[in-house]
Image (cartoon, coloured by chain):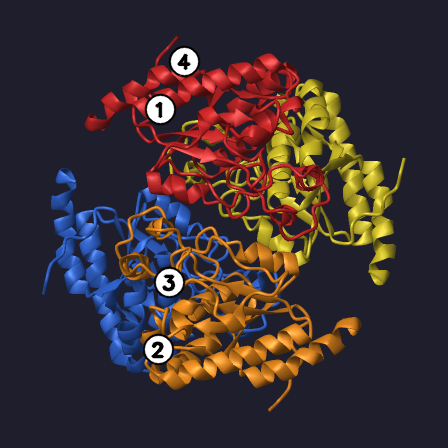
Chain colours: A red, B yellow, C orange, D blue
Amino acid sequence: MTVTPAHPNAALVLIEFQREWLDPEHGRLNHLVEDRDLLDTAVHAAATALNAARAHGVPVVHVPLVLTPGAPELESWTPARLGLRAAIPKAGTWIEGSEGVRFAEAFRPAPGEPVVRGRAGASAFAGSSDFDLILRRLGVTDLYLAGFATHVCVESTLREAHDRGYAAHVIHDACAAFTRVQQEHVREHVIHHFGDELDAAEFAAACPGRIAASPAG
Amino acid sequence: MTVTPAHPNAALVLIEFQREWLDPEHGRLNHLVEDRDLLDTAVHAAATALNAARAHGVPVVHVPLVLTPGAPELESWTPARLGLRAAIPKAGTWIEGSEGVRFAEAFRPAPGEPVVRGRAGASAFAGSSDFDLILRRLGVTDLYLAGFATHVCVESTLREAHDRGYAAHVIHDACAAFTRVQQEHVREHVIHHFGDELDAAEFAAACPGRIAASPAG
Amino acid sequence: MTVTPAHPNAALVLIEFQREWLDPEHGRLNHLVEDRDLLDTAVHAAATALNAARAHGVPVVHVPLVLTPGAPELESWTPARLGLRAAIPKAGTWIEGSEGVRFAEAFRPAPGEPVVRGRAGASAFAGSSDFDLILRRLGVTDLYLAGFATHVCVESTLREAHDRGYAAHVIHDACAAFTRVQQEHVREHVIHHFGDELDAAEFAAACPGRIAASPAG
Amino acid sequence: MTVTPAHPNAALVLIEFQREWLDPEHGRLNHLVEDRDLLDTAVHAAATALNAARAHGVPVVHVPLVLTPGAPELESWTPARLGLRAAIPKAGTWIEGSEGVRFAEAFRPAPGEPVVRGRAGASAFAGSSDFDLILRRLGVTDLYLAGFATHVCVESTLREAHDRGYAAHVIHDACAAFTRVQQEHVREHVIHHFGDELDAAEFAAACPGRIAASPAG
């Protein structure tokens, strides 16, 4: 394992670590992750990344999806006829106050950790999200992404982060697609166009390097 | 073939029909499309779509990539270290005034057809692009996407169009990825999350339906 | 009085009709409006405009200011050192859950009327506001502005509305500056650069015209 | 004169130092500045500020207005019916390639100084402007504004800069309104809500302080 120190302006970005994905009982999307090993691995890897970030002062930004009843945010300015914007209201998922929308226990924001509000769409930047404002406030240039699903919201965030001028790094084992084929496709055919990848152990090993580098930089 | 009339507020969006992709002699990315049949099919299908749109008054919006020498636009506000933002300046492609940046002969904008300016990134909305302003000016709600490459710029545009509230339709045979595997992955695993797909013949058949529908709507 | 029918795509925009401005007891900014006649007139004129809009189906959009304790939204991405971004946290006004932040009784949103969220700044578009998305959803092109204060938040909204491509109309007697001099300055030297003005009686008279015009347009 | 060192992340922002305002012969708006002393003072003060910025390495950002013939940018997504968006196309000013659009001789950008592109509106951020991207690239948090006209484009830029999280400082004698009354109104009733003011001599005296402060900061 090559250890490259994490960028001094790094942030760990946790996308949708909510019960909707992570709780087999209350999560209405949990069953979509057909490859259960991908899901279990992602939860463990993300916990490793989160612990390392917190231990070494790397900012953690939480990106939940929380919609008001009826999901009017997804209508945006046109009726939601296609894609997630149509599917989510139909499924009734991600609604404020529901069981599914709560953060999974192990990934609840610590006091002071910013939680994105107003997001409405797959990308963390979508809708009236304050994600970009939060990142600017923190002086973040380098995003380390973890979450669900790899080929949907994580990938949309990766692509938009690239286009907005951020350096985006996917912590690949801390993300899960529905299937192994989807997961590997993103790693092989997508990530290198928009950023790069590392695993959670590499991220954890890189965090202290960032701290060491900080006083000099 | 089921013919659904095109949406009255439709536009045909042509992404990077420039020599960089389409000219084997002057195009420096032409060789990236390993599956030549995908490329040839895309050119023919896109021509079919373009003719139909023009014949029936469906607006056509051209989305080229044109960067100033050195590609400072891709530095955006951080140095371009990863992804296309790093790769393009290194390759020296897409530079204003170069042979590669010219529209392919068959896809040159007709007088009055809007051409997006200021785009800097994979998505047609990236950077200081006026794509959204053009679409608002035209009253467009439904984007019919064609271009290159399917899994890179077309897909980034599809994803951001969804998140911004547009209904996005991919004219799949008028787009080319580098390989058949990549092309089919987008069709099978990506498009339905963000929009839907049709082929160029379906789009062409749908255009007159739109005209008929207009006076009533 | 010349009656020009209101634009078919009009909306009445009510800026900060909250107790902070309107309640002499709970409103901490109420005393800033030195010219009490301006304030009383604005309340009556705005009520006239609101009644007319509701009676004739002109959409009403409410633009409150609501900040979380400590007003971190106003830090945005830099520490708030100047202007409203510094003054508001210092004064402790506009905080969620406070008395001052509640809508004045006569201007409470009716069921279904959109209420802007995420606004952080003087303009209704500022911060992670969903104002633009709401207007696009409603198909609004013409904003009729009322509220407080004329030369601060109303004027910032007017200016940004102009720059974003909206037609903006100030209902001048339904707005109040702190002094008559400020109020007249905006009317004489500012509005014509960014839109036009009318009074509440003209707006009320124009609303039915809009309805009559709709079937033909 | 109190000398406060300029912020280490400062930039001097020059708004519309073009012939349209500054050339009595070719400039079609030159006559709008009724108070000629305001105009002459602004030219001299801005030259002082520009020299100081260049001498001490404070970045200079040029914000011209340059529109394509017919000014379709000002139509944005709605027909330009009101304000500058209607007045400019009617007057035929600010058109690419015209005499009026050229920078005044003394204010031509030096090699490497960024020039904003795509601006369409009063604020420097309007339309598909790359102003925000340029400022982010330079790491700028503090804008020192100079230009024309004080109560129109300079003030719109001041207001939007505030709302976007920048600290904005108006170099008041390096700006000109049409009349002294307008100029003083902005100074007395507007600036303090959105930033602060200083004069060009203070700015020039502050620039070396910035350099001295840099190694320590």
For the residue marked with disc 2, what is the amino acid? Val
For the residue marked with disc 4, what is the amino acid? Ala
Q: Name the image quarter holding the N terminus of chain A.
A: top left
Q: Which mark is residue A53?
A: 1
Of the image marks 4 and 1, the number of the one nearer the N terminus: 1
What kind of element bears circle 1?
helix
| Separation of residues labelled 4 and 1 (CA atoms) | 12 Å
For the residue marked with disc 1, what is the amino acid? Ala
* Chain letter for the residue marked with disc 1 in the picture: A
The crowding category of the residue bearing disc 4, from other C-alpha atoms within 10 Å (few below 14, some 14 to 19, many at least 20), is some
- Mark 1 or 3: in front is 1
Q: Position of residue C209 (x, y in %)?
A: 70, 80
Q: Is residue B196 left or right of residue A11?
A: right
The crowding category of the residue bearing disc 1, from other C-alpha atoms within 10 Å (few below 14, some 14 to 19, many at least 20), is many
- Mark 2 or 3: in front is 2
Residue at 36% across, 67% down:
D155
The crowding category of the residue bearing disc 3, from other C-alpha atoms within 10 Å (few below 14, some 14 to 19, many at least 20), is many
Q: Name the image quarter holding the C terminus of chain A.
A: top left
| Separation of residues labelled 2 and 3 (CA atoms) | 21 Å
| Residue that carries the numbered disc 3 in the rendered image | D159
